[in-house]
Every structure is written in structure tokens, then in C-alpha cells.
Image (cartoon, rainbow, N blue to C red):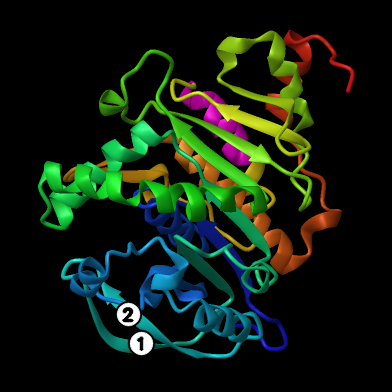
Amino acid sequence: MRKGRRPIILGIVGDSAAGKTTLTRGLVNILGPERVTHVCTDDYHKYDRKERAERGISALHPDCNYMDIMELHLERLHYGQPILKPVYDHSTGTLVRPMYVQPHDFVIVEGLLGFSTPAMRQFYDVRVFLDPPEDLRHVWKIRRDTTKRGYTVEQVQAELARREPDSRDFIRPQRRYADIVVRFSPPCDTPPEEAGANMDVRLTLRPTIPHPDLTYLLANEAHPDYGIRLRLGRDNGPVDILEVAGTVAAEHCTELEQAIWQHLPDLRPLRDDQFGDYQDRTAMRHSDPLALTQLLLTYHLLRKYNDLSALPFAPPVAALSRLQQTAPVVAV
């Protein structure tokens, strides 16, 4: 960590199997593993899997987690101090030896309950909530837990049903505290079990933090086949909504990616196969909307780190010229 500079902390919250680890993996690759500390708040469970079953409590309930220790550890990380973090082994459902964690330039804190208390929320620089449709999340959870954690389909479905009251009461309400809400969803009329690399993404950008200037994308309203558009909306107040279609042409994604990379001066652009990847059962696949989401989040982290607020954010000259030639002027 650079001397005299505290870490930049990103919070990623979402329900089980909402995609938190997938999103984090790409961010670590972009920023560089040597600059990132990854902390999972799910390690702060009070009870192991057997004890939870005996007590009839789910891991989603605050009473099942050391919320006060989470708060203390977030404060220490915020000020660049090390923590002795508990560790929960998801493969066995047991609590194991704690881990000494030293914060680096960037700290990514992901888990179920990261925005639950005012004390925790104050220590994040950027807050992200993952909000996939519930039927899609259920498909993801079944695939993950049957492939990696040894459950049967019936066991996962029963667990989802048992957890639903806690999801409703404790997980989904945290959405209101996010600066950015990320929603991956299947294209229209595509069943969730058939959704693959062509999933759409909608990013709800709240004015709680400064966002990059993407107003040039407003011109795409007249060109719905472009695949990337920005529109104004409301979500507990006025917001910008950035939508990227899963079927977006590769050249259009490249234009926006180049626009973002040129404002990440500390980083060397990566190849497409180094971020934007997700695991589909046992295979790794690439998603352009996921890659763009990870790059935009990286922009926010580096903006905080390097005070990039004075730099303009615009598309490459070639892309802007083409849009000006083909799209009508939109008054904002």
C-alpha cells in the first residue's frame, strides 16, 4: 500500500449465488492480485453448518453472524490496519483457523450482510449490490452447490425455500444502500436455465457517487440495435441506467472498453480472456457485459485512488465521430 494513503474499499453485497465471487475475480485480475485484498463477510458466521441446522437458523440472519466484529474489522481495514479474519470452509461447512490479513491498495469486501448496519456502510468508498432475478439466481445456486458443494438438487431447492424469509427481510433490503445496482438477466423470452454468455446487464447508477460521463450514449436511444444505451430513470430517486445487451456487437463493446481503459492510466489493458469470464458448471465462458461491468467498477476504484475527478470521460474519437454522424442530437 502506498505510504500515507489508506486503502480504497469496495463493498459487493448480494444473496447466495448472485455472482459476487465472479465479479470480484475479474476485478482482482484487472487491478493486479498484488494490489488487492479480498475479504468475505460470510466468514463471520457464529455457527457452523451442523450448529445452524440444530438451531434452525440460516446463515443469512444477522443473529447467525458476528456483526460487531465485522464492523470493527471494516474500520481497521479502512485505516490500513491488519485484521485476524475468521475463515468459514464452504466445502465442509466448518469454521477453521483464522487468517492474518494485511490490506493492500484496494480491499474488496463481498458477502451477504455487508451493508446491514450504518457502521459498516460508512467505511466503503463504493457500494455495489447484485440483483439478478430470483429465478435466475436459483438456477445459479443449484448449479454451484451441486457441482462444488456436494448437494443434490432437492437439497438446494429445500434450502432456498427455508432461506427465503431471511432473504426477504435481511438481504434484499440492502439494495437501497448501493451506489451501483448490477442486474444480469436473460434476454427477453429466454428461460433462466438456458441463459448463458448472452445475458443482458442493467447498471443502476445512483448519484451518491460521481459517475463517468457517458452522456454520449444517449444518442443510442435512436439506434436500439446498437446494444449499449444510457437512459434516465427513477429508483428511490433519479438515476442513470446503463444497459448492455448480451448480443451487443464485439466492436461496440471494444469502443466502450477503450474509452474506459484510457482513463485507467495506472493499468495495462488486459486481453479479453483475462476478465469478463464466468464459470458455467465446469467450463469457463466469456461475457462482454460482465467485462464492461468490471471495467466500470475499476474506473470508480481508481478514481477514488488517484483523484481522477478532474479528467473528462469520453469515448474514443473515432467512436464519437461515428455517433455524431449517424445519430440525431439529443437534448439533455
Decide if residue 265 is in sight here: no
Q: Position of residue 35 (x, y in %)?
A: 51, 74
The answer to whether residue 239 of the structure is visible from this angle is yes
Query: Compared to 121, does 156 lie above or below?
Result: above
Quarter of the image holding residue 194?
Answer: top left
State whether the magenta stretch is mostly helix, strand or loop: helix
Give the answer, above or below, for where 44 lies relative to 224: below
Q: Is residue 255 magenta?
A: yes
Question: Is residue 305 rendered magenta in the image?
Answer: no
Task: Mark 1 and mark 2 in contact? Answer it, CB < 8 Å.
Answer: yes
Specify the amino acid type for callout 1.
Met
- Going by the numbered disc 2, the residue's amino acid type is Val
What is the span of residues highlighted in magenta in the rendered image? 249-258
Does residue 239 sit above or below 26 in this rendering? Answer: above
The label nearer to you, 1 versus 2, is 2
At x 77%, y 43%, the residue is: 313
**Residue 141 image position (x, y, % from top left):** 27, 45
* Residue that numbered label 1 is attached to: 99
**Residue that appears at 35% across and 79% down:** 46
Q: Which residue is mark 2?
A: 87
* Numbered disc 2: secondary structure: strand
Nearest the camera: 38 or 134?
Answer: 134
Instruction: Pick whichever, 241 or 262, lies toward us.
Output: 241
What is the secondary structure assignment of the residue under circle 1? Answer: strand
Q: Quadrant of the N terminus?
A: bottom right
